Amino acid sequence: MSGVRLLVGTRKGAFVLTSDGKRERWEVEGPHFGGWEIYHVNGSPAQPDRLYASQSNGWFGQVVQRSDDGGRTWQAVGNDFAYQGEAGTHLWYDGTPRPWEFTRIWHLEPSRLDPDTVYAGAQDAALFRSTDGGQRWEELTGLRQHATAPAWQPGAGGLCLHTILLGPDDPSRILVAISAAGVFRSDDAGGTWRPANRGLSSEGVIADPDADVGHCVHKIALHPSRPDVLFMQKHWDVMRSDDGAQSWHEVSGDLPSDFGFAIGVHAHEPETVYVVPIKSDSEHYPPEGKLRVYRTRTGGNEWEPLTRGLPQSNCYVDVLRDAMTIDSLEPCGVYFGTTGGQVYASADAGDNWSAAVQDLPPVLSVEAQTLP
Amino acid sequence: MTSVRVRLPAQLRDLAGVGGEVRVGVAGTVTLRSVLDALEEQFPVLKGTVRDRVTAKRRAFIRFFAGETDLSNASADAVLPDAVAGGREPLVVVGAMAGG
């Protein structure tokens, strides 16, 4: 019988949740790497028992862990994330130049085809790639050395590269998103890049609201059957592109707030999208204290609240950018983790929810693996 | 070759897969640099966790002690006290208290 494995990164360790295809009962294993911040754990689509985890903290820096048995055992692999060539500068919060400095890996994205190839998104923003299972990392320098890079400025969480989308049908196409620089697209496997932010507008945030860079993109998602259709949760605004990020238009529609972090696309319905509205950038909790996932079935603008099984009073948690994921069973499962330590699961595409686990440390990321 | 004792904080002991103190072999003068070089040689997983990989500077929240002497801001090339070089006391690597 098929099953689902959830890879959960938290402020104090990693957890692995497993269930059969019914997705009603969850076994929780962990914490792995207790006491460390686990920004992301992700599995190889080509070899699901190959997992990668980003382990870091302020004392001891960055470690990358790899598992070859679905998370039962781990081994530390390479952690030498060296910026190649001259590091250069970006803008600091006060507008002064600041040298690039490595802090941590936010996101790990394994290749769809090769379990030994994995991409890593760094703070300060850069994209690294390993082709030997994480032992050695090489920077794809064209991104950090882009002509606009000296003008990139960090978001509140730092100048982080948090989203990596590999072309489902074209491995040479890579989209990344950086807070608060924006979206960049490569069509030559990461050699050269161009900003892909036309249509984004950041009124009151940057001097030129329609500038090429400077947009605080929080997350992008796509359906693998339509790689040119992209959905974005920006700092404010939910956006859509129909041309592979060459241009964007707003689809926030009737959401109670268009601020948020996470966004996901239904596994079988490319026009069905999920977000979790958050009240504002200063109040990182749901509007009215009601934890609601919003779903559109029309590709945006018209959104319905999904509340059954979610707390509808006195709920003041946040759902961070990498903390929503979707499995590929029928019907698809939707999952998200909160800063309150809950991981909520829906086995029916969002209609009904229950906590797969609660009282974990604050959840930073959740990834679903659909297992045979 | 001098055998030097090193005591690591718990999280680094877990990472290195060791239980208590470790002993590292140091060739030549026993300094912070030579001990940490030997430590990283013996446990490559610790590279970057005590010293910055690029600058080789102590990470901000790491401290070094020999007995009651704080060596955190000492020169990396200063000779360590006889008690450490002679193996009577460990070089202690501490994760500083921080975080509230």
Image: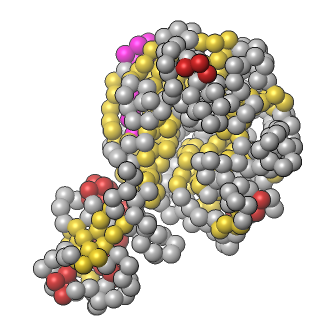
Between A91 and A205, the one lying in front of the other is A205
Q: Name the residue: 33% across, 69% down.
A: B63
Looking at the image, is A92 positioned above or below residue A281?
Answer: below
Q: Position of residue B86 (x, y in %)?
A: 16, 85
Q: Which residue is at the far left?
A: B88
In this picture the colour scheme is secondary structure
Q: Name the residue: 27% across, 60% down.
A: B9
Q: What is the tally of numbered marks visible in this picture? A: 0
Q: Position of residue A225 (x, y in %)?
A: 72, 26
Lateral position of residue A340 relative to residue B72, left or right:
right
Q: Is residue A16 magenta?
A: yes
Residue A85 lies in quadrant: bottom right
User: Which stretch is magenta?
Assistant: A14-25
Lateral position of residue B48 relative to residue B27, left or right:
right
Lateral position of residue A140 relative to residue A29, left or right:
right
Q: Position of residue A21 (x, y in %)?
A: 45, 15
Q: Name the residue: 71% across, 19% down.
A: A255
Looking at the image, is B81 positioned above or below residue B46?
Answer: below
If the image is split into quadrants, where does the N terminus of chain A sit? Answer: top left
Lateral position of residue B49 relative to residue A325, left or right:
left
Q: Position of residue A119 (x, y in %)?
A: 59, 49
Between A189 and A97, the one lying in front of the other is A97
Q: Name the residue: 37% across, 87% down.
A: B77
Q: Is residue A222 magenta?
A: no
Q: Is residue A254 visible?
A: yes
Q: Is residue A328 visible?
A: no
Looking at the image, is A268 positioned above or below residue A107?
Answer: above
